[in-house]
Amino acid sequence: MKLTLLFVLGACAVCAADVVPSGENLRYSINWPSGLSLGEGRMSATRDNQSWTYELQFEAGVPAFAIVDKFTSAVSGAGCSTTFVKEMQHGRRKTKETLEFKDGTLTRQTDKGGKSQREVSGCARDALAFVYFVRRELAQGRIPGSQDVHYGSAYRVKMEFKGTQKVRVGEDIQDADRVMTYIKGPASDLTVELYFGKDAARTPLMAKIPLGLATFSVELVR
């Protein structure tokens, strides 16, 4: 679920300000199929000169097992990742991992002392930066091509536009672009539905995520 939420905007040199010119703060509800809330998430974007910082935080879980995670992405004015930090707490277990992107090399370090490197493209994107890249592409009338997205390991992501569908956002019904997203990683193969608003920012309105015994939903809260 964590990776998919992150996947929950033409040239790469176009600044992310095209999508969220004044920054943004979005709040989401994570729901069971019955509609009962499992938790909530918050996504934000802030600008500092020509660079951007994106954050995603969420709290979810069941009794006696809380999940509190935070993801922070630093992105250049060209829309390329520079750092990506994952801070995760699952029950009593806490972990932290940092990805650094520089000169076509990704360096991955953990709080336990682990370190590895691999070659990446000159403008690689972490999972959170990719969400904003997708939004900019949709605003330009394009669907991003298949590409690697980095969340520790590299995940191959392919997206397909499936038309317009009405979705509920709070008490309102809105038109949304329905995009099927296929995510394949070293030990995962997942297909999710993403719904983006028709507004200029292509705000993520909802995601449907099949996991284990059920399909969970992530829904924008107005």
Image: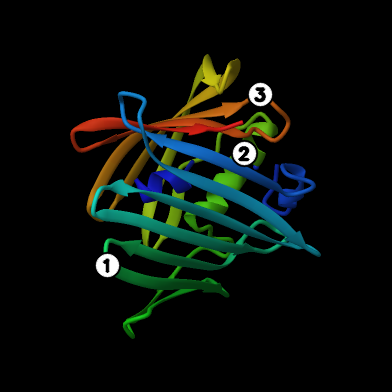
Residue extending furthest left?
213
Which residue shows up at 47% across the image and 60% down it?
Answer: 70
Q: Would you place residue 220 above or below residue 173 in this image?
A: below
Q: Would you say 60 lies left or right of 103 here?
A: left
Circle 3 is placed at which residue position? Answer: 198
Which residue shows up at 20% across the image and 38% down it?
Answer: 212
Cα–Cα span, label 2 and label 1:
35 Å
Q: Position of residue 174 (x, y in %)?
A: 60, 17
Q: Between label 3 and label 1, give the one nearer the viewer.
A: 1
Q: Would you place residue 107 above or below residue 29 in this image?
A: below
Quadrant in which residue 46 is drawn: bottom right
Kindly indicate whether the residue at mark 2 contacts the one at mark 3 (C-beta within 8 angstroms). Answer: no
Element type at mark 2:
helix
Which residue shows up at 23% across the image and 54% down it?
Answer: 64
Circle 2 is placed at which residue position? Answer: 135
Question: Label 2 is placed on what type of residue?
Answer: Arg
Cα–Cα span, label 3 and label 1:
41 Å
Question: Label 3 is placed on what type of residue?
Answer: Lys
Element type at mark 1:
loop
Circle on res. 190? none
Label 1 environment density (alpha carbons within 10 Å; few <14, some 14–19, many ≥20): few
Q: Position of residue 33 (x, y in %)?
A: 31, 26
Circle on res. 92? 1
Q: Locate the N terminus by quadrant.
A: top left
